Structure formats: C-alpha cells, structure tokens
Image: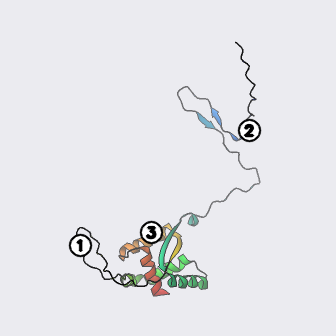
Amino acid sequence: MSTDLPMVPKPPARDRTKLASIALTEPGQPARVVGPAVPKPAAGKATPKRLPATRKSLRATTVTMPATLHDSLRERAQTTGSTIAGVVIEAITQQLENLSELVVSEHNTPATNAPTGPFPDPIAPKGPRVARESLAVVNLRVTAANLKVIDDLVTQHKAASRSQLVTAALRATL
C-alpha cells in the first residue's frame, strides 16, 4: 500500500553549544546533566557585580502621617542631605526616652460608648463629623534589622502601629 503523503521538511538542527549534555547512566538511574547550559561570558567581558549586603537587606514599608508633618519631614531630609528613612530613625532615636508618653498623647480617639452585646469593640457616638487633617502615605526603605527595631519599639511602647510611633516621634522632633 502506498500513500502519497507530502514530504515534510526536517526542522533545522539546534545550536547545541547552548545545551547541556546528558550523560548516560545505568537503567533505572536518573540522568545527569554535564557541562554548563549557558556559555560562560567571553574573556575580558565584565560580569555582573553583586549588590552590597546592605542593599540586599533593605525592606520597604509604608507609614501614614498628617500631610503637614510629611512636608516637614521632606524639608528636613532635603536640608540635612539625609533620606526620609534616616530622618525618621534619627527622630525615633532622639525621642527614645519619651516615646511611651508621646505615643499615648498621639492616640487621639473620639469618646466612645461602652461595648454592647457580643461585639467587643465600642461604637462611636453619632454626631457631627469632625474635619480631619489630610494624610500622606510615606514609603520607607530601611534595613531588615532597623525594621525589626521599629517593630519591637511599637510593641514595647504599646503603639497601635508603626505609623503611630513614627508620627509621635516626628511631631516631637520636627
């Protein structure tokens, strides 16, 4: 029986210089890859440099603060030639002894009714809306170790959040 099928051209050969070789092994054993899958850079060409260890360990976080405080923070960073994160860490360090009192004074909560029924959180009384100061979200890039210190201070001084701690320290410093 003969069938008249059209001839399909053979695919082009692969560039085998970029492929790893697979060594033959005993039956039942997994195959081993031999040689580099990617060719090494030519001699004299620069290889990518590693980032310093401090750059690799930076963590990004955000804190929320009043917009006017953020403006003062930016201004201080520009005049001192520091980063915003540097000014924040400096402010926390300067206010370390007073941080607990500052966090308590920063905690401005409206008067609330006692909890009712099965709900553990109190309900705010109905009343006229009070105009609030506009807020700004500030991006901070700090080392993992410094972020842990900030988190430990939040816990130690019973702050509601990083934002509350940072805002309290900045208000007292700027």
Q: Earlier in the sequence, mark 2 or mark 1?
A: 2
Residue under pointer 2: 15
Which numbered mark, 2 or 1, is in the foreground of this view?
A: 1
Q: Residue at x 73, y 50 (%)?
A: 41
Q: Is residue 93 visible?
A: no
Is 150 displayed left or right of 112 in the figure? right
Circle 2 residues within 10 Å: few <14, some 14–19, many ≥20: few
Q: Earlier in the sequence, mark 3 or mark 2?
A: 2
Q: How far across and how far down the image is residue 132, in percent?
A: 44, 83
Residue under pointer 3: 148
Is 51 displayed left or right of 120 in the figure? right
Q: Is residue 158 visible?
A: yes
Q: How far across and how far down the image is residue 43, in percent?
A: 76, 51
Which numbered mark, 3 or 2, is in the foreground of this view?
A: 2
Is 89 displayed left or right of 40 in the figure? left
Residue under pointer 1: 116
Q: CA distance from mark 3 to mark 2?
A: 50 Å
Q: Look at the picture and state if 64 lies above or below 28.
A: below
Q: Look at the picture and state if 103 lies above or below 120.
A: below
At mark 3, the secondary structure is helix
